[in-house]
Amino acid sequence: MRKNDNITNEYQETVDQMIRTERIDKSNAKFEKTEGGFLKLSFKGKEYPRVKVVRLFPFTEPDRYLSVRDPGNKDREIGLIENLHDLDAATEEEIKKQLNLYYFTPVITKVINIKSEYGYAYFHVMTDCGECRFTINMGSNAVVRLSDTRLLITDLDDNRFEIRDVLALTQKEQRKLDLFL
């Protein structure tokens, strides 16, 4: 065997490992909360002192297809939880807490004012978490249509806000949003 053949075989093994999806479930993994409030994972004989859980389909399948990643290794995927409800109740609850923090998205219930100036839009809104002011860049994809009536708005600091049903807002509020619809 030549030296180049060894390099090719090692490269192929690395690629195979990277594209292989490992299934994580209650039979092969144990999640625990750390003292700092994060999650750690024991999986297939390896310890991960901190993991991050990411929804692959956050709007259509929030409790299915969750990617478990290693933030200490460039967010490399460790494995996939196919269904959160297949885990034990305590683990499901801890993962949901982490997901709720990561995907914190206040729902806009009232548009008080939107002012457009110099390529930015300044929002003053009421959310399910209280009154809020934030700014978006008008030249970016800050406002995304999730459906005919549902909007996701991302501000300059990457905070997310949701309008679940534009039609539930008053006509006056809808007119303020016309620029984004």
Image: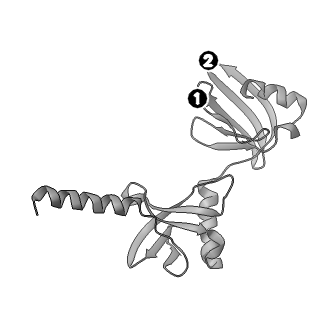
Q: Which of 47 and 131 is in front in this view?
A: 47
| Amino acid at dot 2 | Tyr
Q: How far apart are marks 1 and 2 (CA)?
A: 13 Å
Q: In this view, does 56 lie above or below 68?
A: above
Q: Residue furthest top?
A: 118
Percent position (x, y) of residue 165?
82, 42
Q: Is residue 135 above or below residue 49?
A: above
Q: Residue at x 72, y 28 (%)?
A: 180
Q: Nearer the viewer, mark 1 or mark 2?
A: 1
Any mark on residue 92, and which?
none
Q: Which of 25 and 124 is in front in this view?
A: 25
Q: Which residue is drawn at 53% across and 82% down?
A: 27
Q: In which quarter of the image is residue 148?
A: top right
Q: Residue at x 67, y 58 (%)?
A: 61
Task: Report whether 88 appears left or right of 145.
Answer: left
- For mark 1, what is the residue? 140
Task: Report whether 47 appears left or right of 83.
Answer: left
Q: Nearer the viewer, residue 134 or 178?
A: 178
* First of labels 1, 2 by sequence position: 2
Q: Which residue is drawn at 41% across and 77% down?
A: 44
Q: Categorize mark 1 by other alpha carbons within 10 Å: few (<14), some (14-19), many (20+).
A: few
- For mark 2, what is the residue? 118
Task: Report whether 178 appears left or right of 32.
Answer: right
Percent position (x, y) of residue 139?
59, 24
Percent position (x, y) of residue 19?
41, 59
| Amino acid at dot 1 | Ser
